[in-house]
Amino acid sequence: MQEKLERLVGSVQRVTFHNAQNGFTVLELRTPGETVTVVGVMPQVTPGEELEVVGRYDFHDTYGPQFKAELCERAMPSTAAAILRYLTSGGIKGIGPATARRLVDKFGADTLRILEKEPERLQEIKGISAEKARRLSEEYGRQFGVREVMLFFSRFGLTPDQSLAAFKRYGAAAVDKIKADPYLLCGEGIRLSFEAADAIARSMGFAPDDPCRVEAGAEYVLRHNLGNGHTCIPREKLLPVAAGLLGCDTAAVDEACDRLVLSRRLVEKSIGERPFLFLPQWYEAEQYCAQRLAMMLRFPPERETAAEEDIDRLEAEWGITYAARQREAIRAAVEKGLLILTGGPGTGKTTTLKAIIRLLEDRQLEISLAAPTGRAAKRMTELTGREAKTIHRLLEVSWGEDERQSFLRNEKNPLDCDALIVDELSMVDVGVFESLLRALRLGCRLILVGDSDQLPSVGAGNVLHDLLEAGVLPTVRLTEVFRQAMESLIVTNAHAIVQGSYPQLDKRDNDFFLLTQPNPYKAAATVADLCARRLPEAYGYDPLADIQVLCPSRKMEMGTVSLNNILQERLNPPDPSRPEMTRKSFTLRQGDRVMQIKNNYDIVWTRENGEGGSGVFNGDVGTLDSLDPLTGTLTVRFDDRLALYTGEDIEQLELAYAMTIHKSQGSEFPCVILPLLDVPPKLQYRNLLYTAVTRARKLLIVVGSRRVVEAMVDNDRRTKRYTVLRPMLEASVRMGGLLSGEEA
């Protein structure tokens, strides 16, 4: 049974910790009877302020009582002495100790009222100009704006994080905006569920047939389906889904869509005879990508040539022989402004890329390499011998106060390179691809590399698939598997799977085999024993650095949730020397392998060289470096970055001894263990298996059932994504009077 909420009133004595990005705070509050450590998310507070906090006591064995605040209300200091303490402690940006003393000496207990209501009187103090008086009053008002917003939304059950998100999105006007249209809460930037926003709207008296409710429902369906990869939805499919959500007829949704299109909150575009509905930014993203790629074809860079002798010279220097299609790809990359290079494992994409890089460098061209994730970029660096960056780092990502992502590299500030090579294109969503194209100066070569048989991007769009299906861009598809690669069952089985043939599973002396185990509980124990004992003893693998368990799903006995708990107990068991904290369904412990499960632009990180930044992304994997149960903070090391987590940010971490196959995209591991037994039927499909197999570099062990493996091979279902990049690209190229690209 949950403890009863308690209320504390007191003055802030000391602020131990405050994260300005997400509001997580640790402070000492002096109450009439004692001084209490209070932790929770709250706007910036300053010693001297009076607080009323509502929450629960949490008694820690080591650190004693803490009070976890769920609601914080503030009363500004009212006496001259309390006001002076508040101002001298940095309560208002721009007022230092000397200015604070002069203000309080002049205005006394009326100081804060004058700051808010009569800022022009601040000029009576020497050194305060009219402009400075205005800024000080605005800063004071901004602080009170945060407080008012948090207090208002707390009445409707919003968390402090959600209240802060509303303030970041709409500023001090957030309360008025939400009162006028509470469905803004399920929109961009705050993203409550529609059901939660609807409940708030009903409590405010909004009717079920209110136009803003029906319009918000239609927008919500589109926004929700971005998570399923769709950039748009056919109108005839959106209507019944939205009507079901709203509990109304489709005619009402149809009329709402007309209003949304008329007001430009939605875009309608017909492909053939079929009308599609888009959120504007996603329509513009696909349209821009199509038009920019067509323009790159029409206006290629200054022509370079790649003679056969150049390729012969590299063969002699490196002691290799290029296949015919590799030679074609090398020539095309040098001579054309745009190239797609695709192929499966063992077909020589990396060898081809090295030659392309070398010949471009020989021509004094500046080259940049990029990949979607940190792990993919690190792998690209290792394989090519050249530094590769994540796309976000290459484009110099930044975020505004409302958490909107932007890039410093764009049309006005393009990349300095003469050629850009992007690997793992199947992982790139159309929004990121648009930003990448916007950052290319006219005349920059673009080489896109990927495997179209991999799973599509987590974000909206199906970029690589759409570009290949359009068939209008120069493309080389590598299909020959080289003899050395053919010696690996990982490679040969991957190609067998993608062609619909069953893999060989019985060769225990090779790098791919099956351990049959029909019982899920025994299979889970086998997975744990492989990680903790058998593979380290037999192959010398480090359980944390070298071995990764990949699962089709989170649920079931062989899913990530269950296996992570089992693997944590074997690989990082409880130890008095390793601090830990318990979350909703699992425990985090120092030394754990963890993964970020949502994009978070606020988390601050530093590198060993002193470089700092913010932003940790969905799928990033690291090691829990330190943990402080007293303050509720921890740090995670992601390769060369050390990230600080506080408050509700910690809820975005989960154990990563086992991860889903989807989360593994772009990564490669020395050893992969693949549990395939109690796989839900909807996840038994071919390219999910193919993606898992191609994550393994040296060894892949399937634990489970041959029947499940064969069922996945038999099912060539591809998840349908509604996108329009392909027809837009075809149309853009036709309008430019261009010939279709050829595929070798």
Image (cartoon, rainbow, N blue to C red):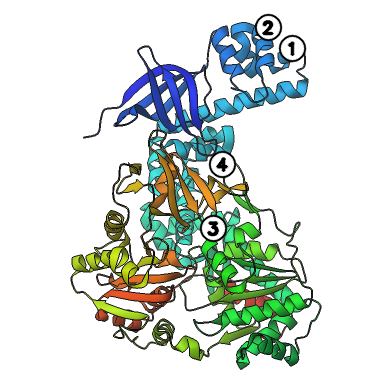
Q: Is residue 478 left or right of residue 95?
A: left
**With respect to residue 544, does 337 lie above or below?**
below
Calculate the distance from the C-alpha at mark 2 to the C-alpha at mark 4.
37 Å
Q: Nearer the viewer, residue 705 or 263?
A: 705
Question: Any mark on residue 55, and which?
Answer: none
Residue designated by label 3: 258
Residue designated by label 1: 125
Q: Nearer the viewer, mark 3 or mark 2?
A: 2
Calculate the distance from the C-alpha at mark 3 to the C-alpha at mark 4.
27 Å
Of pointers 1 and 4, the one earlier in the residue sequence: 1
Calculate the distance from the C-alpha at mark 1 to the C-alpha at mark 4.
35 Å
Of pointers 2 and 1, the one earlier in the residue sequence: 2
Q: Residues within 10 Å of mark 1 (few under 14, many from 20)?
A: few
Q: Residues within 10 Å of mark 3 (few under 14, many from 20)?
A: some
Question: Any mark on residue 106, and which?
Answer: 2
Name the residue rendered at 41%, 57% in the picture: 242
CB atoms of marks 2 and 1 within 8 Å: yes
Return the x and y of residue 506 as percentages of the image width and height.
29, 85
SS at circle 1: loop
CB atoms of marks 1 and 3 within 8 Å: no
Q: Quadrant of the C terminus?
A: bottom right
Of pointers 1 and 3, the one earlier in the residue sequence: 1
Q: Nearer the viewer, residue 506 or 170?
A: 506
Calculate the distance from the C-alpha at mark 1 to the C-alpha at mark 3.
58 Å
Q: Is residue 336 visible?
A: no
Q: Nearer the viewer, mark 3 or mark 4?
A: 4
Residue designated by label 4: 169
Q: Of the residues shown, which amino acid type is indicated by label 4?
A: Arg
